[in-house]
Image (tube, rainbow, N blue to C red):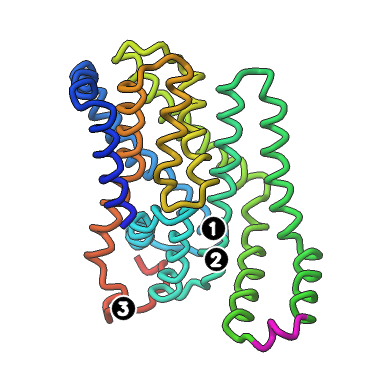
Amino acid sequence: MALIAAIALYSVLIIAFGIQGVWTDLLEIPRGLLLLALSVGLIGQLAFFWRWQWSLQWLKQSLHWRRSAEIYASGLALMATPGRSGEAMRALWLKQRHGIPAQVGLGVTLSERLSDLASAVLVLGWGLGIAAMPMMFLSAAVLIAGAAVISHPKALRQLEALLKNLRWLQQQRRLHRLSQSALLSLRQVRHLVQPTPLILATSCGCLIWLMEASIMHGLFQAMAAPINLNQAAVIRTAMALGGVLSLLPAGIGTSEATSIGIAMAYGASSDQALLATLIIRISTLVLPCGLGWLVLRRQSLGSPNNSKHAGTDE
């Protein structure tokens, strides 16, 4: 539904801004650059898959890369959910198909969202300039420190004791099990906010943000828009953060409005801002979601062939 809504929104925007102007700008973009721009989202997902696989190994959950790739790619079909929360379904698939505790997959997903947010804040600070960097570093540090504190054993014990004293929670069995799973997931997050995994995950996120910003900068240059690389980094990260803060599926509407508004404030025309935004959104949302849907459709997650595997037998 989110993809259908996105396509409908993009069609309305193109008609509203003028089909002729958008088409003229599109013809100014070299085919090679356009192809690279449309594939940058999938390239980024390859890097994020490496991060996913490395995180599982760091948590001592060895899984053959092909089986891991099937689960990761299937999760892309759910990335259009608010805050990409639907990707937590990977944890359920890990448990059903390979016997890996669900809290492991949930912990990896939580740590991924944390590193994505921290890396976006850092790249946004870089784009805004030296004056903004201290505040952005501080914001990223607060995010990471907060995750470390929440997932600290002492804090978890206190939180567990607090939950035990809530009688109404004990009476709600499903909610009680959910709270216990959340606590177990936070224990996994603690392992992933250690210096080595944290630096690797955040660095991976920063590289992807900068790669996408570079592609957006190339698109603006091809259309002769006065947008430099730093400004493109601001547009790209603000687009993502605006979508997350809106809590709408895939940030539809708010992400596009944020990107177009900032690009026009920097001097791009409405047609240029719209086209660059749509190309990046198609690349980083529509195509990965489409790939995930195809993989998910091919998988029969509950079939006998998908019974539990040790993951180290290949």
State left or right for residue 127 relative to residue 40. Answer: right
Give the residue number, with chain letter if any, for mark 2.
Answer: 104
Q: Could you tell me residue 176's position as x and y percent?
A: 64, 81
Q: Could you tell me residue 264's position as x and y percent?
A: 43, 20
- Secondary structure of the residue carrying tag 3 is loop
Say which of 263 and 308 sits in front.
Answer: 263
State left or right for residue 135 relative to residue 300. Answer: right
Q: Quadrant of the C terminus?
A: bottom left
Q: Quadrant of the N terminus?
A: bottom left
Residue occupying image coordinates x 57% and y 61%: 107
Give the residue number, with chain letter if any, for mark 1.
Answer: 108
Q: Is residue 59 above or below residue 25?
A: below
**Real-space Cα separation, disc 3 to disc 2, in angstroms:** 20 Å
Residue occupying image coordinates x 67% and y 38%: 140
Please identify the quarter of the rendering in which residue 21 is found: top left
Q: Earlier in the sequence, mark 3 or mark 2?
A: 2
Disc 1 and disc 2 in contact, CB within 8 angstroms:
yes
Q: Which residue reaches farthest front?
A: 16
- Secondary structure of the residue carrying tag 1 is helix
Give the residue number, with chain letter if any, for mark 3.
Answer: 302
Within 10 Å of disc 3 (Cα), the crowding (few <14, some 14-19, many 20+) is few
Within 10 Å of disc 1 (Cα), the crowding (few <14, some 14-19, many 20+) is many
Q: Could you tell me residue 32's position as x and y percent?
A: 22, 23
